[in-house]
Every structure is written in C-alpha cells, then in structure tokens.
Image (spheres, grey):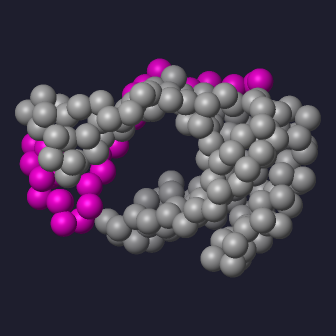
Amino acid sequence: LSHFNFESRYESRAVNNIYFDSGKYGNYADNNHGLPSRVKLRFRWYGQLVGLHDGNLELKCRDNDSIWKHRMLLDGVKIDQETKLLDFSKLMRKNAPPVLQLYTNIFDKIILVNSYLRSYYESKDRKIRVTLDRNIDLYDQQSSTTFNLSRKNPFPEIVILEIKANLDNRSEAEDFLQ
C-alpha cells in the first residue's frame, strides 16, 4: 500500500448484511459458478448486529467488470432474535421502490446474515480504494423462522481484500496488483 501512498479514509466499522435468495438458491449458484452477469439482494447496515438500525436495501448488479448498486434507505428496522424472517421479508417488499420490487418478489428467502469489521483505504490521488474485511461471522438462516444471530457457522480466520476503482482508472488498479 505504501507505493501508492494509501491512507486510511474512514474509521474501521462493523458491516452487517442480510442476504436474500430464491427458493432454488439461484443467487448462490450464480456466484458460486462465477457467472459474469449476476445480481444479489441484501439489506446492509453498520454498527451493532442486534437492535434498531437505519440501513439500505441494496440490489448489487454485476455485468462482467462493471458493478453498480440500487439502494433504498430504510429507517428504524428491527433486527433481533425475535424478528420473524417472513415479517422482515414482507417489510422489504412493502418498502421497496419500483426498481427493487421485482427482485424482492423473486429473492424472497433470507438465507444468511454476516458481520465483519471493514477497514477503508484510498490512494492519495483517490483513484484506487482498498477494503480489508476481517473478524467474519456467518449466521445460517435456512432452518430458522426468526433471525439466528447466536449460532455462528464455522468460518476460517481470513482477511478479504477488495480493490475498487472506476473503469477509467483500471490501468492504475492493474499496476497496483503487480
């Protein structure tokens, strides 16, 4: 990171996600097979895992090297072990804007909650961003009727590094990888 003069841009923070899929786990299969065009639907918030949270219902779209998101802020969403998964899914469908409405109907099953600590770095010229994710916890939701936020799935101690840049800064990002 030093060659590109990276600096920490934000305080590290906890990132939490609720992932949705179809009954046939199409999102999982698309991701697992590395399909170049795919989408995923999630609810993301920052800070504590349990409680009332302001977060974003997000549709993350990928088409080869291009990635974009459609987001909608939802305020005061309750996430705890008493919250019924069906009620949470209905809340997402009810509040989804038209661009997300179709996807909340297709991806109506909550399959996973994850939580991790993310650190953010950016090159001084602001062309390349790097995130480091660690302390990753996974909570399987497939056999629950309410949120499982206590029984973690086994997961190795790893760090995930992501490099992000606009397409017009692709050459700088490729240089960084060398």
- Queried whether the magenta region covers residue 117, the answer comes back as no
- Front residue (pair 3, 75): 75
Tell me: residue 54, above or below residue 64.
above
> Which quadrant does the C terminus fall into?
top left
User: Which region of the structure is painted magenta?
Assistant: 150-178
Q: Quadrant of residue 76?
A: top right
Residue 52 makes an appearance in the image: yes
Q: Quadrant of residue 154?
A: top right
In the picture as drawn, the residue positioned furthest to the front comes out as 75
Q: Quadrant of residue 34?
A: bottom left
Horizontal and vertical percent for residue 5? 13, 34
Horizontal and vertical percent for residue 155? 56, 26
- Queried whether the magenta region covers residue 151, the answer comes back as yes
> Which quadrant does the N terminus fall into?
top left
Tell me: residue 11, above or below residue 168.
above
Q: Is residue 55 left or right of residue 38?
A: right
Q: Is residue 164 left or right of residue 31?
A: left
Horizontal and vertical percent for residue 97? 69, 72
Q: Residue at x 66, y 28 (%)?
A: 48
Tell me: residue 88, above or below residue 66.
above
Horizontal and vertical percent for residue 157? 47, 21
- Front residue (pair 103, 118): 118
Residue 27 makes an appearance in the image: no
- Front residue (pair 124, 129): 124
Q: Residue at x 58, y 62 (%)?
A: 71
